[in-house]
Amino acid sequence: LGDGDGIDMVLGLGDTESVPHFALNNFFFVGASVFFVICILNLFIAGTGTAYDQAQELSPTRFMQERAAICLQCQFRPSLSCKWLESCRVRAYLTLMLLSVAAWAGALLLEGCHPVIPSLFFFFASTVGDAFLLQRPEQISPNPLSF
């Protein structure tokens, strides 16, 4: 509707000197624009409704697939299961992270050390720390208070 001089050309079709004819042009132009917008909106609503119905039919299957993928990813994560680690997982993690952050910051301050080397060190320390915290379902005791 607001494309510059194009509206002047559309409204100028026909005899513009007679007021009733000019009002008729405006009426048909606005009416056709509203009709077109309503038709496009109805097509959009119909397409969206159809896509929603299809997604709704497949949602239980997709949910189970996503859940299985998350479980598989968790099973592939590294886990350390040591007897000495069972009682102090969080303390071991915090100690490792504190030491690795200090070593990482110290290595970044070294002039001859490339920044990738401390970053890789911190990545591996974070992976080991994550393995400290991760408990597999078979490692968790059946005691409900041991969470």
Image (cartoon, rainbow, N blue to C red):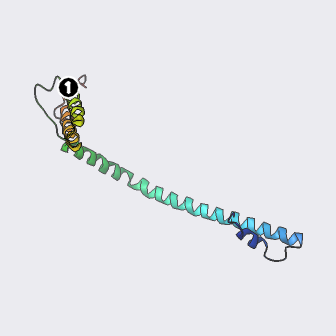
When asked about the image quadrant of residue 32, the answer is bottom right
Residue 124 drawn above or below residue 51? above
Estimate how packed mark 1 is, as few (under 14), some (14 to 19) or many (20 or more) residues with alpha carbons within 10 Å.
few
Residue 84 shown left or right of residue 23 in the figure: left
When asked about the image quadrant of residue 88, the answer is top left
Percent coordinates x, y for residue 36 in the rendering: 66, 66
Find the residue positioned furthest to the left: 83
Find the residue positioned furthest to the bottom: 14
The residue under the point 60% across, 64% down is 40
Q: Nearer the viewer, residue 8 or 76?
A: 8
Percent coordinates x, y for residue 30 in the rendering: 74, 65
Which residue has dot 1 on it? 95
Residue 100 drawn above or below residue 116? above
Q: Is residue 106 visible?
A: yes
Q: Quadrant of the N terminus?
A: bottom right
Q: Nearer the viewer, residue 69 or 82?
A: 82
What's the residue type where badge 1 is placed?
Answer: Thr
Q: How many marks?
A: 1
Q: Nearer the viewer, residue 23 or 12?
A: 12
Q: Quadrant of the C terminus?
A: top left
Find the residue positioned furthest to the right: 18
Find the residue positioned furthest to the front: 111
The residue under the point 56% across, 61% down is 44
Percent coordinates x, y for residue 144 in the rendering: 24, 24
The residue under the point 19% across, 44% down is 76
Percent coordinates x, y for residue 93 in the rendering: 21, 28
Residue 61 shown left or right of residue 49 in the figure: left
Q: Is residue 136 visible?
A: no
